[in-house]
Image (tube, rainbow, N blue to C red):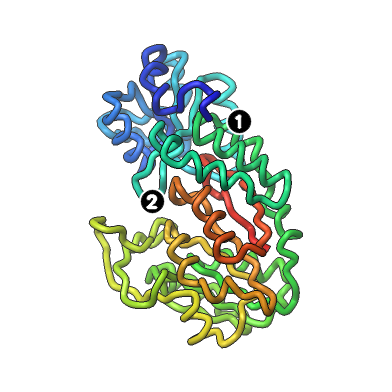
Amino acid sequence: MQNMDLCFWQRLPALAQNKPLVLYGMGDGADKLLRQLERLHLQPAGIFASDQFVRGQNFAGLPVLTYAEAKGRFGEMLVLICFGTEQPDVLANIAKIAAEQELYAPHLPLFGSTLADEAFWQVYQEQLTAAATVWADAQSRAVYRNYLYYMWTGRIEYLQQATSPRLAVWPLLDLQADEVYLDLGAYDGDTVEEFAALVQGSWRQIWALEPDAKNFAKLQARIAGLPKAQALPMAVYQSSGELIFNGQAGRNSAISELGAKAKKQYAVQGISLDDLQRDYLHCMPTYIKMDVEGAEESALLGGRQLLAQTDRPRPKLAIAAYHRTEDIFKLPLLLKELNPDYHLYLRHHPYIPGWETNIYAI
């Protein structure tokens, strides 16, 4: 990255001197971005949202405008996106705004505090370089390169260059009619439903884990009509035992980080992959999807025995690689350490910012 000028966070103060800095979006992402701007001694001049979300409200002491109102007030702007979306109409709107304004989608970690700033690139240069060599095809190497460029610059064109449809990855996984599917972080059952459709209603067993109580109730209701499908109210982790959980009743529900506080915390049962396979599955899973809100590294470490299998087919894996800033290099390197025989593929599916960037291990 050293040949691409300064990273986004170093460049931002100078960029903000030339144009009004305006946020696009509200909510947790905007709060997180505002905290980072405060560290840089920057204040947004305004904020706007997609038209359907503007109802005369204020956010962070600023009136929430439509894009047309913001353009009328500020003219040329430095626009920072501070929400995530995969909705085609919203992605199209972002592209339209990017054609008119200087627009960035800053990379901010969903979990942890590591920022993709100058220190990050210096500290992890060796690991970032090592991870560039593990990918099994040219497309994965291009996705990895463009994803790092996106993290460095905040420019959405690098994400766009890395993007491929979700359905395009399924031939890699080659799902069959007798799969034992393990869905870790099953949320409300949407990915179980997706799997069932892809294998055309034929599988050997489905196990779905979801620790959030409200999500678990939705999961149970959603899979109630599926044969040989069972839900467990557990969180996969490095070791088995009680965990403190931040229940947000949504995709942001997660195992509590050290010192973290949330409005709703409660104890959940944590279980390692190895214990889950031994005590519940009693067979080898053939396909594991892992989207566990920042606990992916821990979950993989808890499956050392299962993932290191060489005397029988190893499970195919689909692992979220975007929750923590370090995941993009830590997770592929860890997978190769756990089982060097895995062939690793990286894909980014339509999303801004860099969410829905997944490792597929075959």
Please name the residue that numbered disc 1 is placed on: 157
* Residue nearer the viewer, 44 or 281: 281
In the depicted structure, whether residue 44 falls above or below residue 189: above
- To which quarter of the image does residue 47 belong? top left
Give the SS element for disc 1. Answer: helix
Q: Is residue 82 visible?
A: no
Q: Residues within 10 Å of mark 2 (few under 14, many from 20)?
A: some
In the picture provided, is 9 more to the left or to the right than 84?
left
Residue 108 appears in which quarter of the rendering? top left
Q: Residue at x 51, y 71 (%)?
A: 304
Tell me if residue 194 can be seen.
yes
| Mark positioned earlier in the residue sequence (2 or 1) | 2
The residue nearer to you, when weighing 259 against 62, is 259
187, above or below 164, in the image: below
Q: Position of residue 92 (x, y in %)?
A: 61, 34
Residue 111 bears which disc, if any? 2
Q: Identify the residue at image location x=26%, y=24%.
A: 41
Quadrant where the C terminus sits is bottom right
Q: Label 1 is placed on what type of residue?
A: Glu
User: Where is residue 212 drawn, in percent x and y?
Assistant: 39, 68
The residue lying furthest to the front in this view is 126
In-front residue for pair 175/94? 175
Cα distance, mark 2 to mark 1?
24 Å
